[in-house]
Image (cartoon, rainbow, N blue to C red):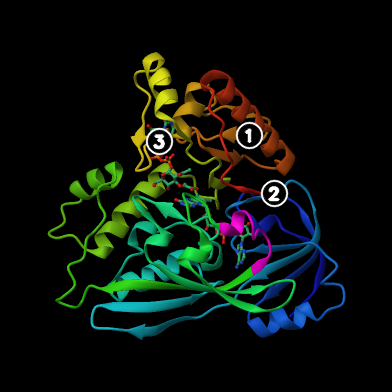
Amino acid sequence: MKIEQGKSLKSLNTFGIEAEAKYFTEIRSVDEFRELARDKRFSGEKKLVLGGGSNVLLTGDFDGWVVKNSISGIETVSETETDVLVRAGAGEVWHDLVMGCIQKNYGGLENLSLIPGLVGAAPIQNIGAYGAELKDTFYELEAIEISSGEPVKFSAMDCVFGYRDSVFKHKLKNQFLIISVSFKLAKLSHAKVAYRFRTEYGDLHRTLGGMKIQSISLQAVSDAICQIRRAKLPDPKELGNAGSFFKNPSISQAQFKTLVSQHSKMPHYLQLDGRVKIPAGWLIEQCGWKGKTVGPVGSHKDQALVLVNYGGATGQEILEFSEAIRQSVKDRFGIELTPEVNIV
Ligand code: FAD
Ligand code: EPU
């Protein structure tokens, strides 16, 4: 375990923003974390746990301790004839876990293929894509309370998962270091398993239709999703970004009726709770931001909801750009956008 000072975080956040951490330590085990927690300087500092840095906006240097979680290991905890419980260390790459499960013919994570980042961050915002969310297969997570060093297990109910949301973004923000996450997955190799593939999402349905596959499989769903994602979303290795910058807002039926009478082409999705979800990308595009740049910052030309760093942008510049977008969507539609990205 190494304690570094004045560490550059540029290669550790997918926006590619230059920012320094006062202290920085990469931990590879719980024991290393305990050793770190014994350092006299540690308790007095503000902390930030970092995974792959694909959902953070660093608005300046971090005046505290950045702990990069690299705890590895994937294991089968238990299994029945039809289900398997898989536990993954927080430092495992999310997409590698998904690929490993597909290879073993374990169903449940395939719709979440190619989401950047590490396993430990996945419950923080209950990652979701193409009709699935982490909570659909989540079993439990193990964490350590940073202030006391106490190990704690969280069930799905404890996590209070919502759309891009969990208790770790609110009441328990920055208080726990997640060390592993377990998933209950279906064993497709077993004849008794009647697995329901989730292929209803428009883009996914269309892409699978065009793939000329003989029969649906976990691999086919994953391949289709990877194809869509590669075509739609900029690769952070080539263009700094953190995926969707804002969440898709949901509005009341009354507000929806007023808006749709003025904008008949407004895309919308009725939610189970009766509210209506509007794609933030559409709202942003309507306000004229799509493909627009201000200095080194821009809204992506193919996906208005993805803000990009064309090179050398500061976190403050990205934040100011996002504020201008938020204000114009509010002025034009009366809808308040909420950032999905964690602003640090
Ligand atoms: P980080 O950015 O490092 O951290 C995110 C938050 O989690 C921070 O608040 C951090 O403090 C906290 N955290 C991280 N690890 C731990 C830990 N071990 N213990 C406690 N707290 C922790 N997200 C989706 O949901 N769906 C998508 O389809 C999607 N597509 C994306 C596409 C692109 C191109 C990009 C760049 C991002 C996309 N994202 C998407 C967002 C992002 O990939 C996810 O939120 C991912 O889970 C973040 O993982 P990370 O390891 O990079 O987290
Ligand atoms: N749209 C526009 N203009 C744009 C972009 C989108 O009009 O520039 C409209 C279109 O009508 C399009 C609709 O928005 O049909 C939805 O767009 P898309 O399918 O690209 O999905 P999204 O709503 O923008 C969400 C998630 C993504 C996730 C995809 C697939 C949020 C905030 N974003 O994006 O997650 O991958 O659906 O499920 O929910 C992320 O969280 O970082 C992320 C990338």
Read off the residue under disc 2. 17
Compared with 172, 313 (above or below) is above
Compared with 144, 229 (above or below) is above
Q: Is residue 169 magenta?
A: yes
- Determine which of the numbered discs, if any, sits on residue 322 in the image: 1
> What amino acid type is highlighted by mark number 2?
Ile
State which mark lies toward you, 1 or 3: 3
Q: Secondary structure at mark 3?
A: loop
- The front one of 92 and 187 is 187
In magenta, the rendered stretch is 167-176
- Determine which of the numbered discs, if any, sits on residue 170 in the image: none
Q: Secondary structure at mark 2?
A: loop
State which mark lies toward you, 3 or 2: 3
Closer to the chain start, of discs 1 and 3, is 3
Closer to the chain start, of discs 1 and 2, is 2
Q: Is residue 45 left or right of residue 270?
A: right
Q: Residues within 10 Å of mark 1 (few under 14, many from 20)?
A: many
Q: Position of residue 299 (x, y in %)?
A: 55, 33
Q: Residue at x 34, y 57 (%)?
A: 111
